[in-house]
Amino acid sequence: MSNSMQTLENHTSSEYKYGFTSNIDTESFAKGLSEEVVRAISAKKEEPEWLTEWRLSAYRRWLEMTEPHWPNVKYPAIDYQDIIYFAAPKKKPQYESLDEVDPELLRTFNRLGIPLGEQKILAGVAVDAVIDSVSVKTTFTKQLSELGIIFCSFSEAVKEHPDLVREYLGSVVPPADNYFAALNSAVFSDGSFVYIPKGVRCPMELSTYFRINAANTGQFERTLIIADEGSFVSYLEGCTAPMRDENQLHAAVVELISKEKATIKYSTVQNWYPGNKEGKGGIYNFVTKRGLCDGDYSKISWAQVETGSAITWKYPSCILKGDHSVGEFYSVAVTNNFQQADTGTKMIHLGNNTRSVIISKGISAGQSQNSYRGQVKVARKAQNAHNFSQCDSLLMGDKCGAHTFPYLEVENPTARVEHEATTSKIGEDQLFYLQQRGLREDDAINMIVNGYCKEVFNELPMEFAVEAQKLLEISLEGSVG
Amino acid sequence: MLEIKDLHVSIEDKEILRGINLQVNPGEVHAIMGPNGSGKSTLASVLAGREEYEVTSGSILYNGQDLLEMDVDKRAHAGLFLAFQYPVEIPGVSTATFLKSSVNAVRKGRGLEELKPVDMLKLLRQKAAELEIDPKFLQRSLNEGFSGGEKKRNEMLQMSLLEPSLGILDETDSGLDIDALKIVADAVNKLRSPERSFIVVTHYQRLLDYIVPDFVHVLSQGRIVRSGDKSLAFELEERGYDWVREKA
Ligand SMILES: Nc1ncnc2c1ncn2[C@@H]1O[C@H](COP(=O)(O)OP(=O)(O)OP(=O)(O)O)[C@@H](O)[C@H]1O
Ligand SMILES: [Mg+2]
């Protein structure tokens, strides 16, 4: 193991109660980033010339950029030369049976209702269940391909559908969009690719059955989803199961393209390692997520439940280009202990009669800091734009903080923009009332928090919502009193 | 049932209850009256276990147990119920969800099995009907946007579902119209039994026409300054609190 791996190991292992040990054999490059490394990554993945060049130009732009410091988060400087940019994990089972796995981890899995087979895979136990999941995957892939739906890894898409990738890659998040997007564009490892053909309604939530595979998507993930005219897709990212990753820095890019009358629903549950109770370790999660409502009557809806990571920097956005297009953002962001989150959305109204809805629910506990940052922009030519924003903050205890930074830029007088914001403390009155009615304190807290998050949970696919609810319970355990 | 001895309670170093003595036997109804700010709600809150109030001295025995040692939810399991003067709103939590959780939590605490969903639904419907509560209310967020009277009726619904052994009603009659008052009184009277006791805090003698108390106590400046039977309530109505204060 290299030195930096060792350091990260030390950072992330001790006390991580949901911990996976990371005895993964990896084929890795030396630390550091250079043109050679970018070329080598591209070569390893057997990419076409144009993509190598695309990465290189992103890398050159990145060199000229500086890391943004406007978010309301604090962390020690990142040494980008101290990171390994390519490590193909060769997964090897670490345990013979579940009996060897940390019982605390299993307890969490059970509370989240994760099936036994998946538990084993997530915990790294050698099982034939892997075979099962592969066969499940094959069955569904067949069903999808009969409808013309493409759902595969990004690398596979580069090989099998180069024209689609080339047309849309970077079309919503240009390589030099921001510092972390540029970095991702230069060195992205893998991710998902989805294409839904015209008029097709994807018959299942994508990734529900494949989330096991998502466990290893890596540090610089790239996702591209294209919904062609009149199509519909609901995509689930992430997994409620606690995710351990030996990489501290994560910089993903997600691009969505919704054509005329198409709808993309993108739901995320993020539960990466948040660092220990003293605020040591934990994932830095710098994500660029953006959707383009390209056609008339197109729609993109983001729903997210964020409980993990030491630092979250994330603003899923919608560019409402088509007339009558709709952008939605529903978010629950929980911070506990020393976590910091600066998250929100951007709604850019370009077309006529466009609508956007923002519902953001922040929950801060411990000594954490939770910021909402939202931008609503209405361009000069955009007639009759309508935005409704509601940003609520719930404080648990008095050492945590909640901050709201709304930015409004309205250049067209026909726009209607409504903004509501509240900050409340979890009420002693509410807790006392529920406990007087026989509920235990933690059940009372969960009931209040669930009620508070209800509008967001309602937007999540059913089974995801149930898991998210349990996840919140675990994340906030013991945070009051 | 309940035995309060020389109870002293402070909040933020201000003494609010200054030596309360009260004995409630099974089956009895005690009315507590007294001017605003005299400490009636404080007494009710301390009985239910509200932490902000500091008990500086005295003791409370509840069915032979040291009540002050018990957690809030454990008191509820043990049959103590407080109908709040100001019921609390909980956005996003439907009244039905709350009632189900509450009934099952209390049942569990009493060593009973949780109710099956069908039986639970039947029970909720039946009790709601008795209190003339529209079932549609059960789908709304708990107490959110309920009128004053609706909130109070909702408190009585909870009480009849939880079948407490000691019901404490803190001004449940305030803000009720005449018809609602009768409905609420009916709910209490229906629960009255030789094993069950009530403490009814009220400002109005009128309620006591419907819920006839065995004893009436007047609380003033943190002390029970006078106790009597229900005729005391009439006397108060006529002569006001100054009369008690003078006599005290
Ligand atoms: N949390 C608190 N902080 C400070 N003072 C308090 C608090 N709670 C109660 N008090 C004070 O204690 C005294 C008694 O209040 P309490 O609510 O018990 O009166 P009450 O008899 O119920 O009055 P009312 O008839 O108006 O309901 C009042 O002076 C009140 O201001
Ligand atoms: Mg009162």
Image: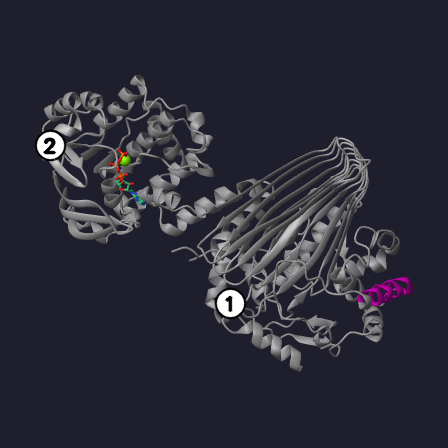
User: What residue span does the magenta drawing correspond to?
Assistant: A47-62
Q: Is residue A1 visible?
A: no
Look at the image and tell me whether residue A286 can be seen: yes
Seen in the picture, residue A230 relative to A478 is either above or below; the reply is above
Look at mark 1 in the image and give the residue it sits on: A98
**In the image: residue B10, left or right of residue A451:** left
Asked if the residue at tag 1 contacts the one at tag 2, i.e. Cβ–Cβ closer than 8 Å, the answer is: no
- How far apart marks 2 and 1 lie (CA) works out to 77 Å
Q: Foreground: A167 or B231?
A: B231
Q: Furthest-right residue in view? A: A49
Question: Residue A126 location, x and y as percent?
Answer: 59, 69
Q: Chain of mark 2?
A: B
Rendered position, A425 above or below A323: below
* Residue marked by disc 2: B246
In the rendered image, residue A314, in percent from the top left (x then y), is placed at 66, 55
**Snapshot quadrant of residue B90:** top left
